[in-house]
């Protein structure tokens, strides 16, 4: 795995982090959480930009958003007691399947 993929995975993880930060910053009304959220957000964009130096735009952006969307939804279920209904789980699995497909078929 080359560094572009490492950057992309880390960018996706950071996207999950800043999504959670937005939740806990309460509309940026909590200064400490807000500052950390913005730092993680910037880091996510910087890592995504680094990945895009070598990866196609559609692949990189699709995987970045997929990691963020699926990861945030899963952590919301696990830590925030968000709904766990079957259709929601299936939709998350479809997102993950799309991310895997973009990686497997990337040139």
Image (cartoon, grey):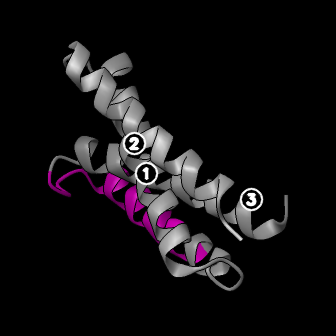
Disc 2/disc 3 C-alpha distance (Å): 20 Å
Residue assigned mark 2 = 95
| Mark found first going from the N terminus, 2 or 3 | 3
Within 10 Å of disc 3 (Cα), the crowding (few <14, some 14-19, many 20+) is some
Residues 16 and 98: in front is 98
| Mark found first going from the N terminus, 1 or 2 | 1
Residue 54: image x %, image y %? 72, 82
Disc 1/disc 3 C-alpha distance (Å): 15 Å
| Mark found first going from the N terminus, 1 or 3 | 3
Is 45 included in the stretch rendered in magenta? yes
Question: Is label 1 or label 3 in front?
Answer: 1
Could you tell me if the residues under marks 1 and 2 are in contact, i.e. CB atoms within 8 Å?
A: yes
Q: Secondary structure at mark 2?
A: helix
Question: Is label 2 or label 3 in front?
Answer: 2
The residues colored magenta run 27-46
Could you tell me if the residues under marks 1 and 3 are in contact, i.e. CB atoms within 8 Å?
A: no
Residue 45: image x %, image y %? 50, 73
Total label count? 3
Q: What residue lies at 58% left-to-right and 46% top-to-bottom?
A: 100
Quadrant including the C terminus: bottom right
Is 59 included in the stretch rendered in magenta? no
Residue 87 at least partly seen: yes
Q: What residue lies at 59% left-to-right and 79% top-to-bottom?
A: 56
């Amino acid at each position: 795995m080359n560094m572009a993929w490492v950057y992309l995975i880390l960018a996706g993880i950071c996207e999950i982090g800043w999504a959670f930060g937005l939740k806990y910053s309460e509309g940026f009304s909590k200064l400490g959480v807000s500052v950390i959220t913005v730092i993680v957000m910037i880091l996510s964009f910087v890592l995504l930009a680094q990945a895009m130096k070598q990866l196609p735009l559609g692949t990189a952006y699709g995987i970045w958003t997929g990691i963020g969307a699926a990861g945030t939804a899963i952590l919301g279920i696990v830590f925030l007691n968000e709904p766990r209904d079957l259709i929601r789980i299936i939709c998350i699995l479809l997102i993950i399947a799309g991310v895997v497909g973009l990686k497997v078929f990337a040139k």
